[in-house]
Amino acid sequence: MSVDSLSLQVPGEWEHRFVAANGCRFHVAQAGDADAPLVLLLHGFPQTWYAWRHQIPAVAAAGYRVVAMDLRGFGLSDRPPRGHDTFSLADDVAGVIRALGHSQAVVIGHGYGGQIAWALPALFPDQVRAIGVLSAPHPIGLRSRRVVPVGTLAALAFAQVPWFPEQRLRRDWVPALLTAWGAPGWECDAVDHYVDAARLPAAAHHILEQARWQVRSSSRPAGRRLLAELKAPVRVPVLALHGTADRALAPASRRHDSQYVAGEYAQHLIAGAGHFLPEEAPDAVTRQVLGLLRSLD
């Protein structure tokens, strides 16, 4: 089934544009005064910028320039043949901050976007004022299989298989993952948007290549180098949000996150919410994000 890429540029209280950075072109949705402090939002798997649709207007109305980007390989951003590793993705984010005309940003990431947010203070310390990590335990803690539920391990294992995962992602895996990882009874009203994004040419392959790198890098030099970098304590403020009904991650996965932070660290649990916090608990997420931003003023 062909997908009209323009349908992914959903109209709303934001404007769409493309930003050149790190050798790629990135799609972003932005709102707020261009001269205001920058808040950069990073989505998770298997979503796009649209996961932040509830937060964009509220953060902009509070006096910030808010930009939600499609990560490399996702949505309407470029899909180059390489660069699916965390180093490249963090480089993308740092490049987008500079391309937007800012020297620093507060970076808020959900899921896989949260993993990138954790890496940024270590790799680009001068460009990050603070980070927010939603449903995203510290990457070192996630390396232990004992803290990942069996269903998530099964999904990661299936993603390592050639070809078949791409076919399923284009067919029915996106709604299945949203249902499996969200809170019981939650229905994502943007599921068609995410399915369409996965059906763009070559999109499913690039989305899965990032998941594959997360698994395969654990025994390779690049993965070990990343973990070595991430052992450096985070010295900027960190806001960590988790849902009590998150079925993608076990509570044990976040148990030791504070030990990786030398600056201010605040962890909050959102009762009844699953893995997809920006959509499952939009008001609570917006309140916590605005609280972090006010603490920096």
Image (cartoon, rainbow, N blue to C red):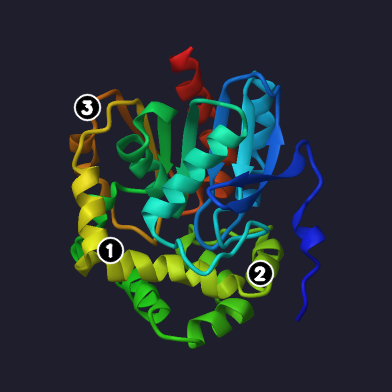
Identify the element where label 2 is drawn.
helix
Rendered residue at 25%/60% (across/down): 223
Q: Nearer the viewer, mark 2 or mark 1?
A: 2
Residue 37 image offset from top left, x and y in percent = 57, 21
Mark positioned earlier in the residue sequence (2 or 3): 2
Residue 55 image offset from top left, x and y in percent = 62, 36
Q: Residues within 10 Å of mark 1 (few under 14, many from 20)?
A: some
Rendered residue at 20%/58% (across/down): 224
Q: Specify whether residue 245 is in view.
A: no
Q: Which mark is residue 225?
A: none
Q: Which residue is mark 3?
A: 262
Residue 207 image offset from top left, x and y in percent = 52, 67
Q: Which mark is residue 148?
A: 1
The residue nearer to you, when weighing 266 against 204, is 204
Mark 2 and mark 1 residues within 8 Å of each other at the beta carbon: no
> Along the horizontal axis of the image, is 235 left or right of 109?
left
Q: Which mark is residue 195?
A: 2
Residue 240 found in image quarter:
top left
What amino acid type should be assigned to the residue bearing mark 2? Val
